Image: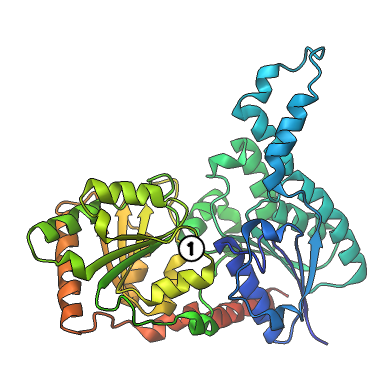
Amino acid sequence: MNKHILIISYYFYPMNTVAAIRLSKIAKFFAKKGWKVTVLTTSNFKLFGIDPTYDNTIYKKINIVRSFEINVSNLGKYYKKAKKNFNSKDKSTNISDFKNDTFKKKIYKYLGPGKFIWYISASFKLRYLLSSYDFDLIYSSYGPISSHKLALSAKKRSNSIWFADFRDHYVENRFEGDTNKRKKVEAEIVKKADKIITVSNGIKNNMVSRYTNFKTKFELVTNGYDSKDKRFYQEKNEGNNKFIISYVGSLYNNQRSPEILFKAISKLISQDLIDKNKFEIKYAGNEGFIFERLAKKHNLGEVISNFGLVNRKKALEIQSNSNLLLIITWNNGQNKGVITGKIYEYMLAERPVLLIVRGKGTGHELRKMISELNIGYSVKESSNGSEKKLRDYILDSYNKFLDDKSIFNPNRKKIEKYDYNNLTDDIINLYESVK
């Protein structure tokens, strides 16, 4: 008889968000390996748009159970309605609550993605599923934390093995409310789950330091790529006479600032070492105005192409038509172990990665990965001579482009371990070791 897995994940196919990719791919490969797959997720999947790269055929074979949730794009309407219906005779509430972020946060606590409303709705769906099926494995994913809370209740009412997956830090996430409450919730999850899966060693080590008595529960299963997505990397001829650096993603209100890159390129152009007519910087994301403003500050406005927010298919196309793929990240004690999912897409694009690490933290995990896989170059912004090192690398890459020489020579054998097909095998092996 086929094994049956219940995946509890708010973010799932066909959402056009990086948060949905991991569990969507894991579900796909569990199904391909002969498991029955049931997924408990949200009905509000259109909120993030639709990702056209998913293979709809395989997901039709998966039992996707979508629990009701209010469309949070209507939060503004609820806010205005609440303000209109405010009862001024109620002395327990001040009208100013409706005018500041505090009240909006209270609404968001209940109506936001994966918050209270979805949790209650999903709880009813979960009861039905547990009464209808015997699951061999329950696999839940944070964030949001409601996915783990649902799995925790399922664990208490069944004999299923439970793997709790952390795609990000939880206790360290200040946006998740009261710290002490977070610690209590996390502690119960660690105690009850059969395995704690993390996507990076940094997250794993942070959690192990808090739960040394349960350190054998912690396992690393990174994010990855789906080799079938290679078909979306289509090179086009236009613009190929230019050396192109592309950045796809958020700048997090300039925390991931590309300014050191712009300084380096501007100097190379001013020294006539680079012809700006043969150079282009592409940006795709929702903070193009910040990107363009910084570029103009360094006289690079003419070389910037701002695509705005694009779907994943277009993002992959931009990557495949680039010579360098840029990643900017922040390294400090609080976000240690945060590895952007873009690195795995970049592996599939087979283009060199240029990593800029901001902050003064040490031992960044992503830098080690790039070095081990030989897929690019990294520079730490706070280190001495970082801008010169960046200029030297860009100039060398640009000159090799002009000479039609490749600068990409990856360790393909090591890269293969990040294929979601192989990562799913790792999860199944963990299940076999526990059952």
Residue at 74 percent of width and 36 percent of height: 78
Residue 331, can we see it? no
From the viewer's side, name the closer residue of 154 and 273: 273
- Number of dots carrying numbers: 1
Residue 159, horizontal then vertical, whole percent: 83, 67
* Quarter that holds the C terminus: bottom right
Residue 62, horizontal then vertical, whole percent: 76, 77
Mark 1 crowd level (few <14, some 14–19, many ≥20, 10 Å Cα)? many
Q: Quadrant of residue 389?
A: bottom left
Residue pointed to by mark 1: 200
Looking at the picture, the colour scheme in use is rainbow
144 lies left or right of 350: right
Please, what is the three-letter code of the amino acid marked with disc 1? Ser
Residue 398 in the image: above or below residue 328: below
Q: Quadrant of residue 3?
A: bottom right
Residue 103, horizontal then vertical, whole percent: 67, 28
From the viewer's side, name the closer residue of 278 and 283: 278
Q: Element under label 1?
A: loop
Q: Quadrant of residue 165?
A: bottom right
81 lies left or right of 363: right
Residue 178, can we see it? yes
19 lies left or right of 149: left
Residue at 71 percent of width and 16 percent of height: 94
Residue 363 in the image: above or below residue 224: above
Residue at 58 percent of width and 52 percent of height: 211
* Quarter that holds the N terminus: bottom right
Residue at 70 percent of width and 49 percent of height: 188
From the viewer's side, name the closer residue of 383 and 101: 101
